[in-house]
Amino acid sequence: MKQLAETLAERIDQPAMLAQVQGWAAVNTGTANLDGLATQAAMLADAFSALPGAVELVDPAPVTAIAADGREFEKAHGQHMVLRVRPDAPRRFLFTGHMDTVFPADHPFQGQTWIDSETLNGPGLADMKGGLSVILHALTAFETLPEAAQVGYDVLVNSDEETGSLSSSALIETLAQGKYAALTYEPSALPDGTLAHARGGSGNYSLTVTGKSAHAGRNPLDGRNAIVAAATLAVRLKELQRSDISVNPAKIEGGAANNVVPDHAILRFNIRPKAPDAAERFVAEMNALLGEVRQSQEVDISVHGGITRPPKPVGARAQKLFDLVRDCGAVLGQHIDWQASGGVCDGNNIAATGVPVVDTMGVRGGKIHSPDEFMIVPSLSERAALSAFVLSRLSSGDTL
């Protein structure tokens, strides 16, 4: 077993991985930068075409959002890359990652800087263009093994993970169907390689409040103040927070001149349920609150949004997958631990289909979503070897 692990590690080309990741990270792929995403998708399709199977760029599903004026509009997204290898194999796996970052095209953080000989600072290096290279090189090494011919896999690299995967969630669900296991390549939870274990869920809402305008001096009582109703909702929604769910009112938009009773406001908020029953309870309580405020303040309230990432508990099969990753890491001389996380990712959506998943198989790094984001460069080949070895074990008899 150790000899196989070492053989796979020797087949990982660390310099090639670094050059690849630096090239990918030089392309700005903020989720709204459609031109940058198109460039990146083409680069990824070319790179992943080195693997057997068919590469396809899939159009995003339609997604709507609420503008500041309350208008619902269609929000554009980039294409998603899908690679399908041996689709008729009896045992198949799913590998997922994302090409988008949180840094828009006009963000000042665009370049790369060496912090020391093993640490590189740059946008999207850890989250998660490093992880995309880990997928590719792990699978390249795995394909040199005879057992590769007995299994198949799909690779999904979506373009909208950072904003909730709304245009790719149905694609994730479809690709997850029938898979034996899944690995997702978010960066490690900690720079030492610690994995994220159980995760809470996430939901985003926009409440559009429509009141009635009036003169603030002559006839204020004829008005129905949408800002006051939105503020009431923000306070009352926050009161629905419990130990198993957080509620974060984030923004109120709308209003009018000081001498006008405002007839329009939008409240945007996020919830983080730790378990499905917490989310269900919140929705019931929210609906009751909306009815109460509609009646007491004589306003109309429309709801847009909902749960986009279901909570991700770790069941028995998923725990076996975590244990296998830990054991494979030990053979390779890598200490692998895990801890619960309040963050969410596509692993939440995969787990909701019943497929066991470990979703922080990407590079070691840290300070993601900030200009201080960094990648620990040797972890490129470390984590690629780990994934290749895990996949070889799953393909040659290990059961979950």
Image (cartoon, helix red, strand yellow):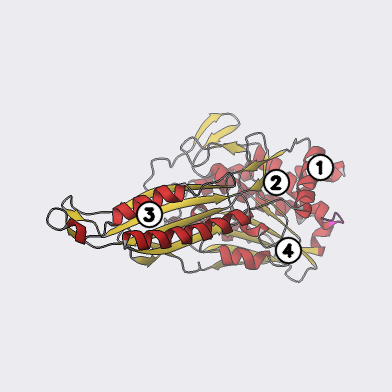
- Residue 389's place in the image compared with 37, above or below, is above
Circle number at residue 384:
2
- Residue 295's place in the image compared with 1, above or below, is below
Of the numbered discs 2 and 3, the one sitting upstream in the chain is 3
From the top left corner, tell me how far across and down residue 297 is, in percent: 32, 59
- The part of the image, by quadrant, that contains residue 214 is bottom left
Q: Residue at x 30, y 52 (%)?
A: 228
Q: Secondary structure at mark 1?
A: helix
Nearer the camera: disc 1 or disc 3:
3
Q: Nearer the viewer, residue 278 or 248?
A: 278
Q: Which residue is mark 1?
A: 327
From the top left corner, tell me how far across and down residue 117 is, in percent: 59, 29
Taking the image as drawn, is residue 105 in sight?
no
Q: Are marks 4 and 2 in contact (CB under 8 Å)?
A: no
Of the numbered discs 4 and 2, the one sitting upstream in the chain is 4
The residue at the far left in this view is 218
Q: In the image, what residue type sits under mark 2?
A: Ala
Q: CA distance from mark 3 to mark 4?
A: 39 Å
- Residue 113's place in the image compared with 324, above or below, is above
Q: In the image, which residues are magenta?
A: 396-400
Q: Residue at x 61, y 49 (%)?
A: 274
Q: Are marks 2 and 3 in contact (CB under 8 Å)?
A: no
Q: Which residue is mark 4?
A: 179
Q: In the image, what residue type sits under mark 3?
A: Leu
Q: CA distance from mark 2 to mark 3?
A: 43 Å
Q: Which residue is mark 3?
A: 267
